[in-house]
Image (cartoon, helix red, strand yellow):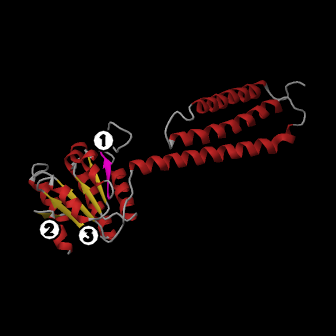
Amino acid sequence: MGLRVPPLVFVSDVILLLVIGYAAFYALRRINRYEEPLNRFLVVTAFSLLLASIGRLIDVFDDFAVNPESVTPLEGALYFFSIVGITYGLINYIRSVERRIFPLPSGEINGGNLPPGGFLYLGEPDEVFEFLGRCEVPALIVTRSPWKYKEFCERVQTLWITQASESGVGPTKLHVILDSAVKFFQGGGRLVIIDCLEILILYNDFHSVFRFLSTLRDYAVEAGSTVLLLMGKSTVGDRELMMLKREFAPIKDLKELLRTSS
């Protein structure tokens, strides 16, 4: 039984077998080493790569076979399930990571007691904690300090703005922050608070941030939800502050939102 394909084809088949086999072995050795969802992804990937390795092994033997067409259906089935498995594992893993980074509303979802639209608060930032305890709606906090809001974890989710961790979103990725907030509204969220406006402006130009905020406000109005900006008086200049006030109604006390909605 001699080689029935060009040597280059045979060499490429062997190299692919070795590469896919090594990848399967690499994934197998890391099963149960990590937490979910990574471990589930490794299990699905390892099994799928094993199927592909078997297919490549059969393909190598085909290079010597007199009638290779007899095993072509088996090879096709192995490759089919291998591709489906890897695709499923990858999509499932990405969704799991997105659910961890981009939170959805938790707790009871109701109409809430807040007026829809955009609001700007220039007072003491610590007052937001009392406000969150009283407004009783699912809220998303876009923040540099997510740990400050842990006591409200039942109804309050956080989106960490950071460049130092894969568990958060970089401050330059305004489109990602917007997408997360919109999905939060669509999932029943009623309040998005941004307490790191100065960081967003620092890493982007003001006009880009203003367009982002205006778009976010429009989505909030459409969903019957609320966007609240927390910022210091020195965060922006007078001209920029006037632009913000045209889109976001300034309030002196966060309790005004609760009184407005009563």
- At label 2, which amino acid type do we have? Glu
- Residue 81 image position (x, y, % from top left): 69, 46
Q: Residue at x 15, y 59 (%)?
A: 121
Reading the image, the residue beneath label 3 is 116
Dividing the picture into quarters, in which one does residue 156 lie? bottom left
Labels 2 and 3 touching (C-beta < 8 A): no
How far apart are the two marked residues, 1 and 3, measured between alpha carbons?
A: 28 Å
Residue 122's place in the image compared with 97, above or below, is below
- Residue 160 image position (x, y, % from top left): 31, 46
How far apart are the two marked residues, 1 and 2, measured between alpha carbons?
A: 31 Å
Dividing the picture into quarters, in which one does residue 192 lie? bottom left
Residue 120's place in the image compared with 72, above or below, is below
- At label 3, which amino acid type do we have? Pro
How far apart are the two marked residues, 2 and 3, measured between alpha carbons?
A: 13 Å
Reading the image, the residue beneath label 1 is 162
Mark 2 or mark 3: which comes first in sequence? 3
Q: Which label number is shown at residue 256?
A: 2
Of 19 and 127, nearer the camera is 127
Query: Is the C terminus in the top left, top right, bottom left or bottom right quadrant?
Result: bottom left
- At label 1, which amino acid type do we have? Thr
